[in-house]
Structure formats: C-alpha cells, structure tokens
Image: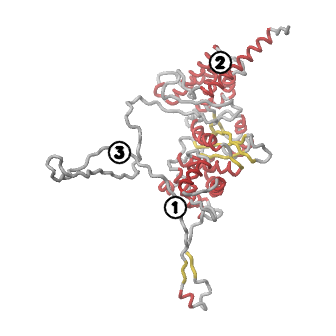
Amino acid sequence: MADMVSREEYEKLLEENKRLREQLDYLMRKMFGKSSEKTELTQEGQTSLFDDDGVFTEPETTGKQTETVTYTRSKKRTTRQEEIASDIPVKEIVYTDDQTVCHNCQRDLQPMGKSFVREQIRFIPAKLYRERVFQTTYKCTYCETHQEIYDQSSIYKAAVPNPILAHSLATPSLVAQVAHNKYELYLPGYRQLQEFEQFGLKVTEPTIINWLNKSALLFKPLMMHLKAELLSQRYIHGDETTCQVLREPNKKANTKSYLWLVCSAKQNAHQVVYFEYHPSRGKEVVQQLFQNYDGHLLCDGYQSYNYLDDLAERSGCWAHLRRKFYEAREGSASGRSLSQTGLKQIDLIFRSYYHPAEQSSLISIDQLVENFFTWVHTHEVLSETKLGKAMKYAINQEVYLRRFLKDSNIALDNNIAERHIKQAVMGRKNWLFSTSQLGATTNAFFLSLVETAKANGLKAWKYLEYLLEKLPQLPQFPSKEQVAVYLPWSEQIQTVCR
C-alpha cells in the first residue's frame, strides 16, 4: 500500500493542481477563446485590450496588441460603408439604345438627356513594361577641327541617373512594390513571384531578396538621422518583439532574436518609428539603443529596462498591467473575485484618464491610483498563480506606473508602440524568418520607413519609391543637409509623397 502523504504535502499538491489547471485554462482560452479583453466592467468604446503571451520577463509583444479607442455615441448605421478618395479618376459610362424609333409611331427618337443609375469601381490590373535606357552622345565640331587649341575631348554624353543596383532589372517602382507587398501586405517572397510571373516577369526569390537588401543600404544615412531625431525628443515609447534569424554567429537556427522599437510620443511634431535588429535582448542592447538619451521613455516592465534608470526617466504601461489581471480572471473563486476587483479599479483609471469630463464630479485619478495600490498591498495571494504574478508586477512597477500623475505629457499606456510593432509581428507570421543578419536589418529599415511614413501622413510606397529614385544620386558620404531633404516631414516630401 502506498505511503500516506502528510497534510502539508496534500495542501501543496492541491495548490500545484490549481496552478496547473489555471495554466491549462489560460492556454485553452488562448487557442480557442475570444481574443478581446472587454469585460462587463469595460464600457463600450472605453478600451479595447487584447491578449498577450508570457509574463514580464518574456517579450511583451506577440501580435495581439492593446488599443485605446474613444467614446462615441451610437449613430444610425448608414447603408453604404465605403469611402472613395476624391482624387480617383472618374469615367462616365453612358448606355444608348440601338433601337432609336418609337414603338408606337415608328418615328425617330430624340435624345433628351441622361439619368444617373449607379456608381461603381472598376479595377485595372497592374502591368509591367520594359525600359531600355539609352544615352545620347554629342560632339563639338569646332573643337574637333581645332585640336591644336583645345586638348580636351570634344565628345559629351548625357547624364544618366544612377540605378539602385548595377546590372540589375530593379527600378525604384519595382523595389517599392516588393517592399509594399512585404511590409504592408505581409506577402512573403514566393507569393510575390507568382504574381510577377502572371505579369510576364520570372525571377527567383533570392533575386528579390537581394533587391531589398541592397536597396536598404541606401537608407543607412537616413536611418541615422531618424534615430538622432527620435533621441532628441523629450517623450518616446519603447517595445520589443521576437524574430528568427537562421544564420547568426554562435547561435542555433531556432533560437530567438529581437526587433527593438522606439517611437515618438503622440504629441511630438515629428513622428519617428524606429526598428533595430539585435541578436539578444540583454541590458547591453538597452544601453546601446538609448545611449546618451536623457528624456522620458514609456515601456513595459521587462527587466533589461531597469538599466535605463541611470540614463533616462521611464514610466510603466497600465494596459500591460490590466492584461495581467484580465488573464487571471478565470482562477479560483477567490482569485476570480480579486481579479475582477483589480480590473474594475484599473478600468476606472482608464476612464478617468481618457474621459476626464465624465469623472469631474467623481473621485480624482490621483485618488483612484492611490486606492488601487493600497488594495494591491493589502492582499496576499499565491505568487505562482497568474493573479499573484499580476499583483507582483503591480508592486514592482509601482514607481513607474505612478509617473504619469506628475507629468501630463506622459501617456497612461504604451499602445502607440504596440500598434507600430504589430506590423512586425504580422509580418513575422508570414515571412517566418530571415536567413541572415543582413536580412533582419533590412526588415528593420523598411519597417521603420513604412511606419514613419504612415505616421507622418504619407503614402508609404510612394515615399519608398521617391527615396529609391533620389538617394542613389547622393554622394557616397552625404552631408546632413543633403539627407534632411528626404526626412518625411520635410516640405518637399510632404508635397510629393502624400
């Protein structure tokens, strides 16, 4: 007969069983449940927060991000939801009748006007055409007949713009389209090859990858300026997510690498979204990425950000904290009750922050925050449960979570960074991996330019095409003034690329 377990061991087994069941329930909800984090405590239009993997020692971003939307009064839904841009060309189609005689008297009918029937959109498929570039040659007949006076050549050739790649079929429009397909529509290379073949161009996947990699090198001076502009701003946001690079020194192909994101706060005039690839996510990356930065960073509670405290001030993300309490809501009865209480208090903080007019006659946001942390400190729960981890996260991040109360320019959450980094996450689900470190850096460059263009009101593909036309014409080491012309908020870019 098996030995009887002691009372203490029995209670430990019960707690272990509860913890494992909680993890199982969480994983089942992640796979088969709803992704929305709305609860009965969340009023419609207040916040929309989505699930996230892991705890704060793991990457924050997994593709299911947080968003904040504003309150809107319910309006009667119109029958037509489409919007047509005003600059789309208009072509009128007028139908006439071949039978132009009266059915009664058989006399000719006279046209008396036209009546509107409907409006519709016609799609014209893309097409390719081949450019054969020639260079006109000139000669000076006078110099040619007076060679004893002029020892210089009398032959001249017309200037030809430098190509993106020497001896390549790639053009700015073609590479911009490949980048648009990959970084905005998330299409991997092999899917694009099928479309190009239908248009009459048969290329290989390594070829279009080479186009992107070599083109990205042209962006290096511009990327340096964007990063410098970003780190000169007082308020910024940070986040990071995983990526996979097959060929990295001293690393297995299936190990994780990282894309780090830094972006401008909402109120900054010049919006910059900057991605940077790194093989690791250690403290050395944080120190290198934010070197000499003395502003304010809003980020999640990942432990490597602790090494920023000597460099810059930082604040925490309440949306990230809320997510942890939301994930803990399906635990034991007591744990579920506490999770709901925590969610309710955090939701009140969100409502007070985003809709202060509605809270004018109620308790202040300062007092709501104080009440929440008083509640957290007065409850002890099992540390290994999700509720325990949520409580621990709140306590560890309290100093940073309170920072927004002292400065109205500090946001309550990191949603702006999560929205930008979601583009990398969506792409990762389709590209799956980068073959080399160069490919990972290329992804970071193009994602930066695409997201920065959109943040500044530009059409990303148009901006990329313009850059790919103009940057090859700059000298090998362009000056700051030469590069500044192509920053997304410059007057020239704003005129051409909208």
| Labelled disc at residue 119 | 3
Q: Is residue 197 left or right of residue 439?
A: left
Q: Secondary structure at mark 3?
A: loop
| Image point (56%, 28%), residue name | 36
Q: Are marks 1 and 2 in contact (CB under 8 Å)?
A: no
Which residue is drawn at the image coordinates 65% and 20% (left, top)?
376
**From what the image shows, is residue 413 above or below residue 214?**
above
**Looking at the image, is 400 positioned above or below residue 94?**
above
53 w.r.t. 180: above or below: above
345, above or below 261, in the image = above
Image quadrant where one finds the N terminus: top right
Which disc, if any, is residue 184? none
Residue drawn at (65%, 62%) of the image: 477
Q: How packed is label 3: few (under 14 Cα within 10 Å), some, or many (20 or more)?
A: few
Secondary structure beneath label 2? loop
Front: mark 1 or 2: 1
Return the x and y of residue 252 as percentages of the image width and height.
78, 43
Mark 2 crowdedness (10 Å alpha carbons): few <14, some 14-19, many ≥20: many
Which label lies toward us, 3 or 2?
A: 3
N-terminal label among 1 and 2 = 1
Numbered label attached to residue 331: 2
Marking on residue 129: 1
Q: Quadrant of residue 336?
A: top right
Where does residue 21 sit, x and y in percent of width and height?
69, 19
Alpha carbons under labels 3 and 2: distance apart? 55 Å
User: Where does residue 109 sit, x and y in percent of width and height?
Assistant: 18, 52
Check disc 1 and report its element: helix, strand or loop.
loop
Write down the quadrant of residue 16 in the picture: top right
If you read the primary sequence from the N terminus, does the residue marked by circle 3 or circle 2 appear first?
Answer: 3
- The amino acid pointed to by label 2 is Gly
- Identify which amino acid the numbered label 1 is placed on: Tyr
Q: Nearer the viewer, residue 147 or 184?
A: 184
